[in-house]
Image (tube, grey):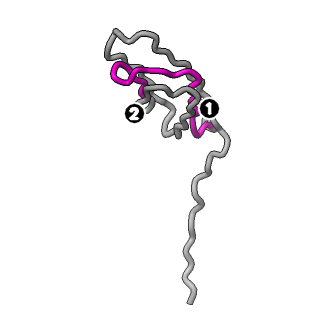
Amino acid sequence: MSEDVCRIILNFEQFSLECSKEYLTVDGRKYCGNQNGRSVFIDIQSAQIDILYTKIDSSSIGSRFKINGIQDTTNCLDPPPQLTLKKTL
């Protein structure tokens, strides 16, 4: 991943997971249900993002997801400027 990337955008193009039987975890946040058309913005804290699909019950049929990921380098905030305090007499 490029150093210029400040966030990842996940576009849930197709996403339907039965919450009681399966879910997707992205950096500790769980996603399930119908998320079609949703976009999720994940600020980059490190060069690694954990994505885990968990299936609790094998009887779940027809679950599907298609997610498009984009490395975003636009609108990244620079570190805040150093403040200098001056005392006036």
Name the residue: 65% across, 38% down.
73
On-image quarter of the C terminus: bottom right
Q: Amino acid at mark 1?
A: Gln
- Residue 88 percent location from the top left of the image: 57, 86
Name the residue: 48% across, 21% down.
16
Front position among marks 2 and 1: 2
Q: Amino acid at mark 2?
A: Gly
Q: State the residue lying farthest toward the bottom.
A: 89
- Residue 42 percent location from the top left of the image: 52, 37
Q: Which residue is mark 1?
A: 71
Determine which quarter of the picture holds residue 10: top right
Question: Any mark on residue 50, and which?
Answer: none
How crowded pointer 2 is (Cα within 10 Å; few <14, some 14-19, many 20+) is rated as few
Q: N-terminal of the two: label 2 or label 1?
A: 2
Label 2 secondary element: loop
> In this picture, which residue range is highlighted in magenta?
5-25
Label 1 secondary element: strand
Q: Which residue is mark 2?
A: 28
How crowded pointer 1 is (Cα within 10 Å; few <14, some 14-19, many 20+) is rated as some
Q: Is residue 49 left or right of residue 19?
A: right
- Above or below for 58 versus 45: above
**Are discs 2 and 1 less than 8 Å apart at CB?**
no
